[in-house]
Image (cartoon, helix red, strand yellow):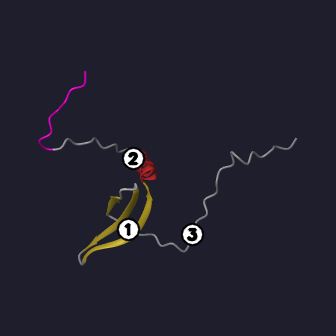
Amino acid sequence: MTKKIDKENKPLEINLNTNLNSIWADNFTIDIREDNICLIRFLTGLPEGIFEQARIMTSKEDLKKFIDALCQVSTYYPIKKEKKGAKKTTKK
């Protein structure tokens, strides 16, 4: 008996671009436009200054998925810090 391949549940293959360079980044910035398009800039600090290494544009929804994945992989889940001067409120 042959197995029927379910094309809808077939995992997608990742096609690697071997021409891309790997970069070292020790910082990044994220800017979000009014239309929820995000610009992520990866930066490297060197004695000569800060150098931009790569730019990535994505949606705010996908950015949240990236952040979730980074938290899972690093097992680091930051806690939102209160702003200075903000009053604490207690939920009942």
Instruction: Say which quadrant the C terminus sits in.
Output: top left
Prevailing SS of the magenta stretch? loop
Tell me, yes or no, whether the two marked residues, 1 and 3, touch with CB atoms within 8 Å. Answer: no
Name the quarter where the N terminus is drawn: top right
Residue name at image x 42 percent, y 45 percent: 72
Residue type of the residue flagged with mark 2:
Cys
Q: Could you tell me how far apart the alpha carbons at marks 3 and 2 are, in whole angstroms?
A: 26 Å
Q: State which tag comes first along the sequence, 3 or 2.
A: 3
Q: Which of the numbered marks, if any, corresponds to residue 1?
A: none
Q: Which residue is mark 2?
A: 71
Residue at image position (17%, 32%) is 88
Mark 2 surroundings within 10 Å by alpha-carbon count, few (fewer than 14), some (14 through 19), many (20 or more): few
Q: Determine whether the residue tagged by mark 2 lies in a helix, strand or loop.
A: helix
- Tell me if label 3 and label 2 are in contact, CB under 8 Å: no
* Picture quadrant of residue 53: bottom left
Give the image quarter of residue 87.
top left
Where, by quadrant of the figure, is residue 24 drawn?
Answer: bottom left
Within 10 Å of the Cα at label 1, are there few (<14), some (14-19), or many (20+) other Cα atoms?
few
**20 and 86: which one is in front?**
86
| Extreme residue in the front direction | 34
